Amino acid sequence: MNKNKRIEEARDFYENIEIPKELSERVEKAIAEHPEKEERAEKKILSIGRTITAAAAAAVVCFTAALNTSEAFAKEAGELPVIGGLARVLTIRSYESHENDVNIAVRVPAVEVEENAGSQENLSEAEQETLQEGGMETMTAEQLAEQKEFTGDINAEIEKIVDEFVKKAEQDFAESKEAFFATGGTEEEWGGREMDVQTDYEVKYQKGSVLSMVLTLNEVWVAAYGEQYYYNLDLSTNRELTLKDVLGEDYQRIADETIVAQMYERAESEGYVYWGVTDTDDEIDMGGFDGVDEETKFYLNEQGNPVVCFAKYEVGPGYMGVQEFEIVK
Amino acid sequence: MKKSKYDVIVKHILENQAKSYRIAYSYVPEKEAALDIVQNAICKALENYSSLRKEEAVKSWFYKILVNEAVQYIRKNRREISCEPEKIKEEVYVERAYEPGEEVYRKVCELPEQMRTVVLLHYFEQLTLKEIAEVTDTNLNTVKTRLYAALKRLKTMVEIG
């Protein structure tokens, strides 16, 4: 017996094992059910570099500088959205495109500082009041430059996040499509699938020099997949606020207590499962809630209370989606 | 743009799905079960993708998850599977003659799990013995021992069969 020959024949047989046509579907399904998690501890990258994807650049159909008209804010302020010196949230880019079965709808916000923010002469009474509330009566040219740099960094980061998200979604779609056909899928099975990509933002709170905004990115395909970015800016100090800034030194105890209490309530009322809290089956360590820290994501609601947000899969199974916990001050 | 760890894994999974299926099928020769094994392995991999330390190791990392998943499946279903073989054999004998290579392939699939893993990965998937040691969490000598033992058994089985 020639051992090698027989092994080779066996390998040929092995390589010709029939691949069921359901395979690619099952593989895609499993992948779609497990989107990439946001790296929790990873520091957000502030980048000045701007990347505009070719597709995005080509597809710009309108360029608007419409004033932010977020309902939450409109109710709160009722007038021009003025922050600190004189900054407001604008939509700097907005476009829709439909190419290669990918439908894109994008709104990119930016925090803009007005050139004449140093002088208050032209401001309405209401605006002056807002300025005073924020303790921003006057601003030197130096302060203004700092503020511009700070908001510029934030804006560049937002733009980068949006562009990369759109680019990645387009790539994912094209690659999966290619892989689908490369592994024997037919046009019929593919069935003209389309992908929707949306990015949008909402100003959640704006008072004095403080601005809270949520940037949302969604990819709707075999399964929905989304990312949220939270911006809590203090334009009097030009920094991003943390939970500690909002709740004080004792913030961890305050936040952890109310979050855990709310998790138990929801476990009871909604049947939700919170890994490591209401579900302590430690056979597999799924991660889960292990206390807030200065990196914990949140936004400020209309009352100015922090609302701590956990991404899908961060504290419980994916079907629960994003979990929000208001912490009443 | 640098690809994230997650992207690297997804790409590997998409490109190697047929291979993954064949491996699963060689542990549990039943279509639905093999599909389940592949799907579960992907879920495990993507739930724990941060456990992949180096992106270059994605190949052996994923083989490891897949093989573990297959072996676990067999253990869970041992009772049901253990009463099957005779029936399967009978059908095969009655229905048709072996294709070339099929006989040896079937013998490989009858090997005990540990030996089967080594033969599958070395001869069919063409991994080096060192890579197999990584996949199976053992050392090189153990892999060699298992490989020789497997070959010896195969030889007897094929000659007798």
Image: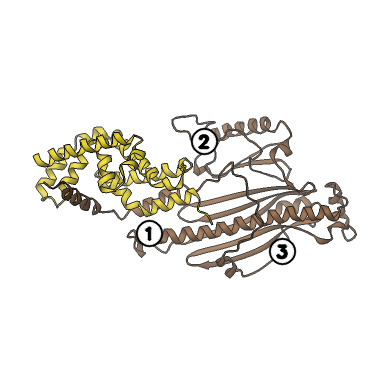
Chain colours: A brown, B yellow
The answer to whether residue A29 is above or below residue A267 is below
- In this rendered view, identify the residue nearer to me: A7 or B86: A7
Q: Which mark is residue A287?
A: 2
Of label 2 and label 3, which has the lower sequence position? 3
Q: Which mark is residue A299?
A: none
Q: What separation in Å lies between label 2 and label 1 (alpha carbons)? A: 33 Å
Q: What separation in Å lies between label 3 and label 1 (alpha carbons)? A: 42 Å
The chain under label 3 reads A
> For mark 3, what is the residue?
A66
Q: Which mark is residue A180?
A: 1
Q: Are marks 2 and 3 in contact (CB under 8 Å)?
A: no
Of label 2 and label 1, which has the lower sequence position? 1
Q: Are marks 3 and 1 in contact (CB under 8 Å)?
A: no
Residue B113 visible here: no
Amino acid, disc 1: Phe
The answer to whether residue A280 is above or below residue A321 is above
Q: Which quadrant holds the N terminus of chain B?
A: bottom right
Residue A309 visible here: yes
- In this rendered view, identify the residue nearer to me: B17 or A303: B17
Label 1 element class: helix
Mark 3 or 1: the one toward you: 1
Amino acid, disc 2: Gly
The chain under label 1 reads A
In-image side of A61 versus B56 (left or right): right
The 10 Å Cα crowd at callout 3, few under 14, some 14 to 19, many 20 or more, is few
Q: Are marks 2 and 1 in contact (CB under 8 Å)?
A: no
